[in-house]
Image (cartoon, rainbow, N blue to C red):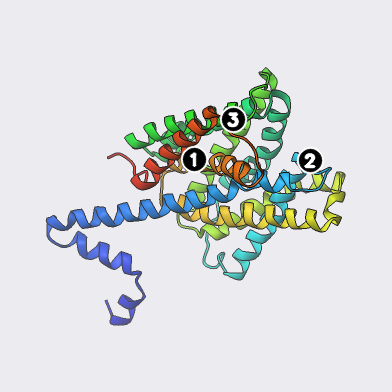
Amino acid sequence: MTRETALKRPLCDIIHARIQHSHPNLKGLRQLLEKHGSVRGALLVLCGAVLWGTTGTSQALAPVGATSLEVGALRVVIGGAALLALALVKRSFRGVVGWPVLPTLIAILATAAYQPLFFTGTARTGVAVGTLTALATAPVVSGVLGYFALGERPSRVWYLSSLLAVGGCSLLTLAGDAGGTVNPVGMLFSTGAGAAYAVFVLSSKFLVKGRSPDAVNGVVFAGAGLVLLPVLLANPPAWLADPRGLAVALHLGLFATALPYFLFLKGLKLVPASTSVTLTAAEPLTASLLGVFLLGERMSCIGWTGIVMTFVGVSLLALGGGEERD
């Protein structure tokens, strides 16, 4: 190997290569480096989930007339355009060979389907029951499909963290809308939303193997934006003419969609799919805290208990990195 070629190799690859050919006692150092990468990945996913949590607050500040379906479609259209532009500017598609069509189509359709499924579910069965059903479905589906499709074995910490996170989200959503009614059709839609999100994560996990996360984001969200664009063309949101409405739309598209998914896929490359889904429980946690401290909403004791449970569950997984079992 020439000196010039060695300089071009990533530092982490050089360290790993030296460790593998060194004394067995240095195996612990290699494991430490891998653990550091997992923790970094978990924190990136966590940051993305926190930014997603600003969606509800932003929607609450939107002008009168902004419907949930319009907001959902608009954030994907704007976010998809921004992510595609970022990928093109960074030349993330350069050197990409053999892009898999089927996983890409699955990721696009899952991303596009999540919006109408989720909002239809919450409209029919209430925000509490609908959100709870989606949140409870996603970790289970991601864990099962991740095991069979990607060969991922969730860590023991994942089971405890998922239990705490789902339980905490349950208390949060029920505390937020105690009057919600259970509608079987609505629950079916909400279950579909949770499954769609899990499928998006798993297909994206497959796509980022050997490809730039920026390129994957650009293709998937630009495609999902095209799928949802007819929703906006059929009923153009007039509230965008209001400066406040435009500001809300830009926040939803750039800071509640493009930026968090930019962080999320970079983290997804470093942690198991099941871990990333559980960590996104930070989204309703953030939304609840913003509602209390920014919008002046009141939180019951049940709600605060849910906040603590969710925070503990997410923190356990983030600090543990969510590494797979041997």
Q: Position of residue 93 (x, y in %)?
A: 57, 64
On the rendered structure, is 299 left or right of 245? left
On-image quarter of the C terminus: top left
> Residue 167 — which label?
none
The residue sitting at 62% across, 67% down in the picture is: 88
Tell me where residue 134 sits by quadrant.
top right
The residue sitting at 63% across, 28% down in the picture is: 128
Disc 3 and disc 1 in contact, CB within 8 angstroms? no
Label 1: element kind = helix
On-image quarter of the N terminus: bottom left
> Residue 277 — which label?
1
Task: Check disc 2 and give the amino acid type.
Answer: Thr
Instruction: From the image, state whether disc 3 or disc 2 is nearer to you.
Output: 3
Instruction: From the image, state whether disc 3 or disc 1 is nearer to you.
Output: 3
**Looking at the image, which is closer to me, 44 or 204?**
44
**Residue picked out by circle 2:** 67
Label 3: element kind = helix
On the rendered structure, is 210 left or right of 233? left
Q: Position of residue 249 (x, y in %)?
A: 74, 54
Task: Check disc 3 and give the amino acid type.
Answer: Thr
Disc 1 and disc 2 in contact, CB within 8 angstroms? no
What is the CA distance from the residue labelled 1 to the residue labelled 2?
27 Å
Tell me where residue 69 sits by quadrant.
top right
What is the CA distance from the residue labelled 3 to the residue labelled 2?
20 Å
Q: Position of residue 47 (x, y in %)?
A: 50, 52
The residue sitting at 62% across, 45% down in the picture is: 105
On the rendered structure, is 92 left or right of 80? left
Mark 3 crowd level (few <14, some 14–19, many ≥20, 10 Å Cα): many
**Residue picked out by circle 3:** 173
- Up/down of 90 relative to 276, above or below: below
Label 2: element kind = loop
